[in-house]
Amino acid sequence: MSLKGVELQIAIPKTFDAGKVVEQQQQHVANQQMHANEALKREVERQQKIVNETDGLTGINEEEERQREQEREQQERKKNEQLAKRAKHPFKGNFVDFSG
């Protein structure tokens, strides 16, 4: 396939233009990949911090739960003691026998 001079005058500038377009597309793709990598790094760091925060909160929740359980047990004991004090025997203490 042979090209004439006139055809070369049109073809050569177009190849330069096409080369520039291809280079711009490659740079655009590279920039997109770079931004995606940065976003991924930020997301990973955020997730790592979230895990650390929830680990600390889990320990606090367990401690609070233990304290609440102890408080419930103490309240239950107090209720039982008060009920025991209030409970009256059906025969004892109701009748005093003065005959003797």
Image (cartoon, helix red, strand yellow):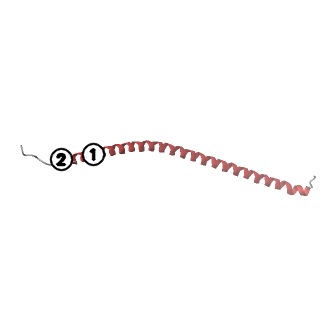
Q: Tell me where residue 13 appears, x and y as whole percent.
A: 83, 55
Residue drawn where x is 49% and y is 42% of the image: 52
Residue drawn where x is 91% and y is 55% of the image: 5
Residue drawn where x is 36% and y is 45% of the image: 68
Quadrant housing the C terminus:
top left
Q: Can you identify the residue that label 2 sits on?
A: 91
38 relative to 23 in the view: left or right: left
Mark 2 to mark 1 CA distance (whole Å): 22 Å
- Looking at this view, is 18 or 65 the one in front? 65
Q: Amino acid at mark 2?
A: Phe
The count of marks equals 2
Residue sitting farthest toward the front: 100
Q: Can you identify the residue that label 1 sits on?
A: 80
Vertical position of residue 75 compared to residue 10: above or below: above
48 relative to 61 in the view: left or right: right
40 relative to 73 in the view: left or right: right
- Looking at this view, is 31 or 43 the one in front? 43
